[in-house]
Image: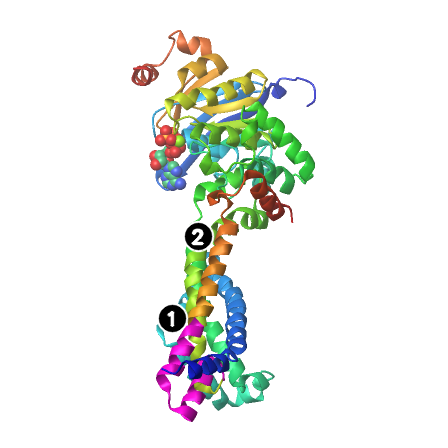
C-alpha cells in the first residue's frame, strides 16, 4: 500500500462526510418523531391504530433498506399522482429519496426501541407519581419519559450506528457521500482495496464519535450512576427539573 | 375545617365498599372510619384486600359499589379529577417507589413544584425541613440507589408529606426492610402520628399498632372481621379468626 495515495484518498473521501451526516441526521430526527408516534399507536392507539403501526413495522423491518431506496427512487415516479403532487420537486431528488427511505426505515426500528423503553417503566413508579397528584402530560414528562429514555438509550445507540453505516447505500442512487466518492475514485484509479480501507476507516471514526456521544448522553441522563461530587450533580439535575 | 360537628369528626368514612377483579371479590361490604388526627392500623393475611382498600381510598382503583367520604365530601363525583384529591392524600409503598432518576430532595420537591406550583426556593426550604423531620438532612442530594432501604422509605415519607396531605396511607412500609431499619421508619411514623397526622397503616408491627393506633381493623378474605379500639383489641375481646392470625404473627 502506498501511504501517500492513502493519505490523498482519505482527504478526498472526507468531502463525503457532510452529506453523510446530513442524510443521517435528518433521517434520525424525522424518524424519531415518527417512531414515537408509531410507538404510541402500538401502546395506546387501540386495535385499529395498533395494527396499522404493527403492519408498518413488519414491512419496513422485514424488507431490505436497499429495496426500499430503489422503490422510492424508481418507483414513486411511476405514479401520475406523485408526479403531479407538491412533493414531486423533492421526491425526484435522489437526496430526498435517500432521506425518506432512511427515515421510514429507522422509524420502524426506533418505534420498537421506544415501545420497549416505555414498557420497561415500572408500574410502581407511575403509581407513586399518581399518588403524588401527578397525571397526564406532567406524569409522562417527569417520570415515564426520563425512565423510558434511559432504558432505550443503549438500543437507540445501536440504531444510530446502523444508520450511519446505512448512508453508504445512498451512493447507489448517485449520491456522492463517502461510499459514492470511493466508487468514483476506484473507477478512476482501480485501487479498490486502499480506497475501501480508507472509506471503512472514515465510517469507523464517525461511529467512534457516535459511541462516545451516546456514552455522554447516557452519563448525563444517569446522575445516580455517576461518581461526580454531590453538589455538581445536584445543580445539573435541578436545571433538568426546573425548565 | 368548620365546626367539629358529628360528621366532621371523621376524615374518612368507607361505607359498604365492594370491589372485585373479574370474578374475584376482593373487598366485601367493607366499612371503615378514620377519625381526624388518628391512626387506624389494618392487619390481615396476605391477599385479604388490605392494599386494595388503601388504593381505593385515594382513588387509584375504581370501586364496584359503596361510598367513600373524604373530608366531608363524597368522592364518587371526584373520580374524573382524582389527581386533585390525591394531592391531599400521601401514600407510602412497601417498595418505597422513589423516582430512581431523581435525588432525594428532587423526589420531594417535584410534586410541590409541578402540581402545586410552589416556587423552587420554597419547595427546597420545605424539603430540607422534612428531611430533618425524617432524620436524614444530610442525604438531600443522594440518589435512591445510594440510600439504605430505611433511608429510602423515610425519603418516601418526606415526599408524601411535602404535599401537606390531610391523610397518610402506608402500605406495609417496613415489610421490605431489614430488622435494624424497621425501627427508624416506625419512629418517624410514630412521631407523625403523635403530632396528629391522620393515617391508615397496613402493617404487622404490633408494637407500633399498640402505641400509635386509635383502632385496629382486622381483614380476612376481603371482609372486615374485627374493628376495635386498640386497647380492646389487645385485651382479648376478639373474633377467633383474629386470634388465630395474631398467634401466627406474634409467634
Ligand atoms: N390488579 C389486580 N388484578 C387482579 N387481582 C388482583 C389485583 N390486585 C390484587 N388482586 C387480588 O386481590 C386480592 C387482594 O389483594 P391485595 O393486594 O389487596 O391483598 P393484601 O391484603 O394487600 O395482601 P398482601 O399482604 O400480600 O399485600 C388478592 O387475591 C390479589 O391476588
Ligand atoms: Mg398488600
Residue at 37% across, 12% down? B238
What x and y, as percent, mark residue B64?
46, 37
Residue at 62% across, 17% down? B6
What x and y, as percent, mark residue B89?
56, 31
The residue where tag 1 is placed is A61
Tell me which segment is drawn in magenta. Answer: A176-203
Q: Does the magenta stretch include residue A108?
A: no
Q: Classify mark 2: residues with Cα within 10 Å, few (<14), some (14-19) or many (20+).
A: many
Q: In the rendered image, is residue B32 in sight? A: yes
* Viewer-side residue, B134 vs B218: B134
What x and y, as percent, mark residue B232?
43, 9
Q: Going from the N terminus, do you reach mark 2 or mark 1 first?
A: 1
Q: Classify mark 1: residues with Cα within 10 Å, few (<14), some (14-19) or many (20+).
A: some
The residue where tag 2 is placed is A151
In the rendered view, tell whether residue A118 sits above or below residue A194.
above
Q: How many labels does the image show?
A: 2
Answer yes or no: do the residues labelled 2 and 1 have beta carbons within 8 Å?
A: no
What x and y, as percent, mark residue A159?
43, 65
Q: Is the magenta stretch mostly helix, strand or loop?
A: helix
In the rendered view, tell whether residue B207 sits above or below residue A88.
above
Quarter of the N terminus of chain A within the rendering: bottom left
Is label 2 within 8 A of ligand 1 (CB to nearest ligand atom)? Answer: no
Specify the quadrant of the image occupied by residue B177.
Answer: top left
Amino acid at each position: 500500500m502506498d501511504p501517500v495515495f492513502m493519505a490523498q484518498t482519505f482527504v478526498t473521501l472526507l468531502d463525503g462526510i457532510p452529506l453523510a451526516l446530513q442524510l443521517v441526521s435528518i433521517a434520525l430526527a424525522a424518524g424519531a418523531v415518527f417512531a414515537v408516534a408509531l410507538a404510541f399507536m402500538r401502546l395506546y392507539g387501540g386495535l385499529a391504530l395498533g395494527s396499522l403501526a404493527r403492519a408498518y413495522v413488519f414491512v419496513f423491518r422485514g424488507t431490505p433498506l436497499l429495496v426500499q431506496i430503489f422503490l422510492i427512487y424508481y418507483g414513486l415516479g411511476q405514479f401520475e399522482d406523485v408526479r403531479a403532487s407538491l412533493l414531486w420537486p423533492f421526491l425526484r431528488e435522489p437526496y430526498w429519496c435517500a432521506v425518506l427511505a432512511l427515515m421510514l426505515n429507522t422509524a420502524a426500528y426506533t418505534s420498537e426501541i421506544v415501545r420497549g423503553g416505555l414498557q420497561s417503566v415500572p408500574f410502581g413508579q407511575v403509581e407513586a407519581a399518581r399518588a403524588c397528584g401527578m397525571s397526564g402530560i406532567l406524569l409522562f414528562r417527569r417520570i415515564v419519559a426520563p425512565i423510558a429514555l434511559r432504558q432505550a438509550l443503549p438500543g437507540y445507540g445501536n440504531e444510530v450506528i446502523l444508520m450511519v453505516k446505512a448512508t453508504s447505500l445512498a451512493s447507489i442512487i448517485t449520491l456522492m457521500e463517502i461510499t459514492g466518492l470511493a466508487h468514483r475514485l476506484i473507477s478512476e484509479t482501480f485501487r479498490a482495496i486502499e480506497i475501501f480501507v480508507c472509506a471503512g476507516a472514515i465510517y469507523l471514526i464517525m461511529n467512534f464519535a457516535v459511541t462516545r456521544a451516546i456514552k455522554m448522553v447516557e452519563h448525563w441522563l444517569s446522575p445516580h450512576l455517576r461518581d461526580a461530587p454531590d453538589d455538581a450533580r445536584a445543580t445539573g439535575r435541578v436545571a433538568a427539573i426546573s425548565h | 375545617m368548620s365546626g367539629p360537628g358529628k360528621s366532621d369528626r371523621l376524615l374518612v368514612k368507607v361505607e359498604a365498599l365492594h370491589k372485585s377483579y373479574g370474578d374475584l371479590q376482593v373487598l366485601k361490604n367493607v366499612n371503615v372510619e378514620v377519625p381526624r388526627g388518628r391512626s387506624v392500623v389494618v392487619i390481615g393475611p396476605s391477599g385479604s384486600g388490605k392494599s386494595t382498600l388503601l388504593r381505593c381510598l385515594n382513588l387509584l382503583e375504581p370501586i364496584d359499589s359503596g361510598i367513600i367520604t373524604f373530608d366531608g365530601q363524597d368522592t364518587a363525583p371526584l373520580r374524573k379529577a382524582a389527581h386533585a384529591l390525591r394531592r391531599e392524600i400521601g401514600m407510602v409503598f412497601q417498595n418505597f417507589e422513589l423516582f430512581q432518576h431523581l435525588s432525594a430532595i428532587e423526589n420531594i420537591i417535584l410534586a410541590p413544584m409541578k402540581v402545586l406550583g410552589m416556587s423552587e426556593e420554597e419547595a427546597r426550604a420545605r424539603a430540607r425541613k422534612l428531611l430533618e423531620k425524617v432524620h436524614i438532612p444530610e442525604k438531600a442530594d443522594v440518589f435512591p440507589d445510594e440510600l439504605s432501604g430505611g433511608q429510602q422509605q423515610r425519603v418516601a415519607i418526606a415526599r408524601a408529606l411535602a404535599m401537606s396531605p390531610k391523610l397518610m396511607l402506608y402500605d406495609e412500609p417496613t415489610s421490605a426492610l431489614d430488622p435494624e431499619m424497621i425501627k427508624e421508619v416506625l419512629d418517624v411514623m410514630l412521631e407523625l402520628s403523635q403530632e396528629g397526622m391522620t393515617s391508615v397503616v397496613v402493617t404487622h408491627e404490633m408494637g407500633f399498632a399498640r402505641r400509635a393506633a386509635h383502632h385496629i381493623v382486622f381483614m380476612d378474605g376481603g371482609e372486615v372481621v374485627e374493628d376495635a379500639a386498640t386497647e380492646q383489641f389487645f385485651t382479648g375481646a376478639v373474633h377467633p379468626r383474629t386470634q388465630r392470625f395474631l398467634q401466627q404473627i406474634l409467634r
